[in-house]
Image (tube, grey):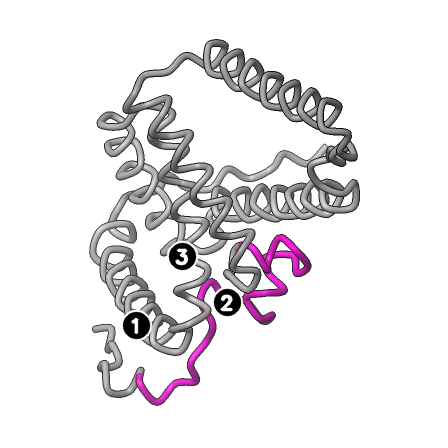
């Protein structure tokens, strides 16, 4: 019996779903709080400072080919000289000593980041296991294809370049998706429907024609 596939026009009438089937807003998916503020560029100063800092580090290590130990030593020497000159000048002119910071970030910020990373890692692992079990065949083959493309891309990038590329994606993709959410969901929905159609055709024309041996009956004692 021939299989009848619905047309694209019919698919347009189906209710539009969010990307990856999520039900929560993108801010909630990112964990909320300061982490979401940075990734969505709601805290522009911190986001810009983080982007500039990571770009400078990438330029130093990858372009200028700086060594980590050498860079750390030079930064420490420069910092110690600046502090020494600052305090010596203050004592010479009887100025009040400058207040030096005792911490870079609050403890709560680290705890929030670690908690968000832990939660997202567990969700990613759970999703990966669901895909690997073949619950959604279309998503399974899409994941295989994506991982293959990722492996090919990895041949042309060093590990540091790959980490920097991932950082750039984290700093740009959530922000762009939050800004153009409706358009992305619309086109992503079309691609997912087409992928499911292709898998149905592949399933009916190839997988269903693979001969399978008779099921073995369990021996009853």
Label 2: how many residues lie within 10 Å, few (<14), some (14-19) or many (20+)? few
Question: Is 138 placed above or below 104 here?
Answer: below
Image location of residue 112, percent across then percent down? 73, 47
Q: Position of residue 194 (x, y in %)?
A: 26, 67
Q: Specify start and end residues of the magenta stretch as a single range.
A: 12-38
Residue 26, horizontal then vertical, whole percent: 54, 66
Residue that carries the numbered disc 1 in the rendered image: 187
* Residue 130 versus residue 44 in the image, above or below: above
Q: Are marks 3 and 1 in contact (CB under 8 Å)?
A: no
Nearest the viewer among 220 and 123 is 123
Q: Residue at x 46, y 16 (%)?
A: 71
Q: Residue at x 33, y 48 (%)?
A: 141
Query: Which quadrant holds the C terminus?
Result: top right
Residues 188 and 59: in front is: 59
Q: CA distance from mark 3 to mark 1?
A: 16 Å
Which residue, as the protein is rendered here, is positioned at the far bottom? 13
Q: Earlier in the sequence, mark 3 or mark 1?
A: 3
Q: Earlier in the sequence, mark 3 or mark 2?
A: 2
Is 178 left or right of 7, judged from the image as shown?
right
Say which quarter of the image contains residue 182: bottom left
Residue identified by numbered label 2: 21
Taking 149 as reference, is 73 left or right?
A: right
Task: Look at 47% across and 51% down and name the residue there.
Answer: 48
In this rendering, which labeled residue sits more in front, label 2 or label 1? 1
Q: Which residue is mark 3?
A: 173
Under tag 1, what secondary structure? helix
- Please check the rendered image and state whether residue 27 is part of the magenta-colored stretch, yes or no: yes
Mark earlier in primary sequence (2, 1): 2
């Amino acid at each position: 019996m021939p299989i009848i596939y619905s047309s694209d026009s019919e698919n347009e009438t189906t209710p539009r779903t969010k990307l990856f089937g999520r039900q929560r807003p993108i801010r909630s998916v990112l964990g909320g709080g300061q982490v979401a503020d940075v990734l969505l560029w709601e805290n522009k100063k911190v986001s810009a400072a983080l982007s500039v800092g990571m770009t400078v580090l990438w330029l130093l290590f990858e372009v200028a080919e700086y060594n980590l130990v050498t860079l750390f030593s030079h930064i420490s020497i420069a910092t110690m000289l600046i502090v020494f000159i600052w305090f010596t000048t203050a004592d010479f002119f009887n100025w009040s000593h400058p207040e030096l910071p005792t911490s870079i970030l609050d403890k709560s910020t680290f705890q929030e980041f670690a908690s968000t990373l832990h939660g997202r890692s567990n969700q990613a692992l759970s999703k990966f296991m669901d895909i690997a079990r073949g619950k959604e065949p279309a998503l399974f083959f899409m994941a295989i294809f994506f991982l293959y493309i990722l492996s090919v891309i990895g041949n042309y990038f060093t590990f540091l370049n790959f980490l920097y590329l991932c950082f750039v994606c984290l700093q740009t993709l959530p922000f762009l998706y939050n800004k153009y959410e409706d358009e992305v969901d619309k086109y992503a929905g079309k691609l997912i429907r087409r992928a499911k159609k292709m898998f149905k055709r592949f399933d009916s024309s190839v997988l269903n024609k693979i001969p399978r041996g008779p099921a073995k009956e369990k021996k009853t004692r």
